[in-house]
Amino acid sequence: MTPRPTISLIVITRDEQELIGQCLASASFCDELIVVDSNSTDRTVEIASSLGAKVFDEPFTDYVRQKQIALDHATSEWVLLLDADEQATHDLGVEIVRTISAPNAADGYRIRRVLYHLGHYYTRPIYRDRPVRLFRRDRGHIGGVDPHDKVIIGGRVDRLASPILHFSYRDIADHVATINRFSTRGAAEIEPSAFAAVQMFTHAVWRFFNFYVVRGGFLDGGRGLYAAMTAAFYVFLKYAKAYERRLKALHPR
């Protein structure tokens, strides 16, 4: 019997002791666990090592570079990329093993992420998040614009049916802190124009309408309203910070 292709899990971490154990345990079907850690001060490294992960220390610069470093350490034929706050479901593990063992396997696979927040799994398309997370190691690399990294595949990309579970925020305060951090990084990638002040409003309004109406957030009641409002707030902050940078350039102190 021909052995199935091997799989490396890659994860980047920094102070993720609350979730890294569940993340790694959920990928027990993988042959190799790779963790690239950025100077954690908690038990992240200890927990990862105890579960058999190969842990590499690397100072953090940006998400794209950090995940590429993790990919560079992988040695298996296939790579599964998870964030520390994500978990592969049992059905996903079974589907991955079956899929990569097929003779007509694609070069990469998109996997739906299901966010869990406020005691609720957002299974509706309000979060239409289906990134490439499984791919042949020799056909993919990490690209995108920080903080929104993505896997770029040189070949055919297909979809898997089973999801990744995403436990992104401990509470609303943690969500707001994440929005603040990511909007700062997002603003740094924007070249502010004379319309930056207008974009604060128009882009945020469109994001709210898109999440709440187009994607059906209203069907999730108060939680859907919350999701749409926070999505709009992120966009507002990103353009507000770009606008602030423009003002400082025009009126230096």
Image (cartoon, helix red, strand yellow):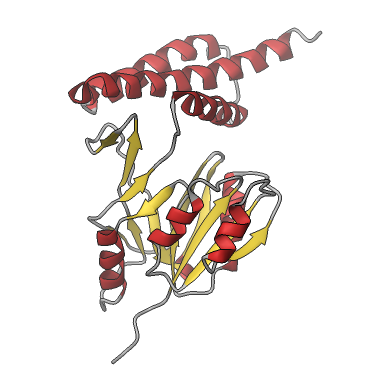
- Outermost residue on the right side: it is 253
- Judge from the rendering whether residue 159 lies leftward or rightward of residue 84; answer left or right: left
Among the 4 quarters of the image, the one containing residue 201? top left
- The residue located at (33%, 54%) in the rendering is 110
Residue 134 point in image, percent of width and height = 38, 61
- Judge from the rendering whether residue 108 lies leftward or rightward of residue 176; answer left or right: left
Q: Is residue 127 above or below residue 142?
A: above
- The residue located at (61%, 51%) in the rendering is 43
Residue 25 point in image, percent of width and height = 42, 61
Of 126 and 241, the residue lying toward us: 126
Of 198 and 226, the residue lying toward us: 226
Q: Is residue 43 above or below residue 208?
A: below
Of 249 and 185, the residue lying toward us: 185
Among the 4 quarters of the image, the one containing residue 129? top left
- Which image quadrant: the N terminus? bottom left
- The residue located at (47%, 28%) in the rendering is 175
- Judge from the rendering whether residue 63 lies leftward or rightward of residue 92; answer left or right: right
Number of labels in the image equals 0
Residue 243 point in image, percent of width and height = 60, 14
Residue 65 point in image, percent of width and height = 62, 51
- Outermost residue on the left side: it is 219
- Which image quadrant: the C terminus? top right
Residue 132 appears in the rendering: yes
- Outermost residue on the bottom side: it is 1
Residue 71 appears in the rendering: no
Q: Is residue 187 above or below residue 76?
A: above
